[in-house]
Image (cartoon, helix red, strand yellow):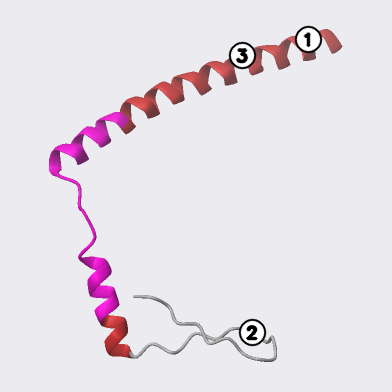
C-alpha cells in the first residue's frame, strides 16, 4: 500500500496519515502471507554447514591464538 504524504506549505515536517487498527491488521496479514519458511531439508543442510564452518573457524582461531601466545612468551623471555 502506498504511503500518502501530506506536504505542509510552510516547509515543516512531513506528516503521514494515521493508520487505523483494522488497516494495520490487514497490512500485517498481507506481510505474513509473504513469509516463506525453509523446508526441513534446507534447515538441516544449513545447520550442518554452520557446524562445519564453526569447527573450521574455531581451529583457525586456536592456531592464531597459539601463535600469538608463543610470540608473546618469546618476547617476554627476551626481556628477562
Local secondary structure at mark 3: helix
Please name the predominant secondary structure of the magenta segment in the image.
helix
- Pointer 1 local density, CA inside 10 Å: few below 14, some 14–19, many at least 20: few
In percent of the image, x 27 and y 88: which residue is there?
22
Q: Secondary structure at mark 2?
A: loop
Q: Residues within 10 Å of mark 3 (few under 14, many from 20)?
A: few
On the image, the x and y values in percent for residue 67 come to: 61, 13
As drawn, is 25 to the left or to the right of 75?
Answer: left
Position in image of residue 13 (x %, y %)? 64, 84
Describe residue 59's horizontal placement relative to residue 73 as left or right.
left
Q: Which mark is residue 77?
A: 1
Q: Position of residue 52 (x, y in %)?
A: 32, 25
Q: Quarter of the image containing the N terminus? A: bottom left
Q: Could you tell which of marks 1 and 3 lies nearer the N-terminus? A: 3
Q: Which residues are magenta?
A: 26-49
> How far apart are the two marked residues, 3 and 2, measured between alpha carbons?
57 Å
Residue that appears at 14% across and 37% down: 41
Element on which disc 1 rests: helix
Is residue 27 within the magenta segment? yes
Pick the residue in front: 57 or 23: 23
Mark 3 or mark 2, which has the lower sequence index?
A: 2
Q: Which residue is mark 2?
A: 13
Q: Mark 3 = which residue?
A: 67
Q: Note whether 48 is above or below 64 in the view shown.
A: below
N-terminal of the pair, mark 2 or mark 1, is 2
Q: Residue at x 20, y 65 (%)?
A: 33
Badge 2: residue crowd in 10 Å (few <14, some 14–19, many ≥20): few
For the C terminus, the quadrant is top right
Q: From the viewer's perspective, is 20 left or right of 72?
A: left
Real-space CA distance between mark 1 and mark 3, rounded to the nearest whole angstrom: 15 Å
Residue at the left extreme of this rendering: 40
Q: Alpha-carbon distance for marks 2 and 1?
A: 66 Å
Amino acid at each position: 500500500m502506498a504511503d500518502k504524504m501530506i506536504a505542509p506549505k510552510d516547509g515543516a515536517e512531513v506528516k503521514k496519515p494515521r493508520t487505523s487498527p483494522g488497516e494495520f491488521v490487514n497490512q500485517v496479514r498481507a506481510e505474513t502471507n509473504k513469509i516463506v519458511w525453509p523446508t526441513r531439508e534446507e534447515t538441516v543442510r544449513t545447520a550442518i554447514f554452520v557446524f562445519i564452518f564453526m569447527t573450521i573457524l574455531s581451529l583457525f582461531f586456536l592456531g592464531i591464538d597459539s601463535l600469538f601466545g608463543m610470540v608473546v612468551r618469546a618476547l617476554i623471555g627476551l626481556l628477562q
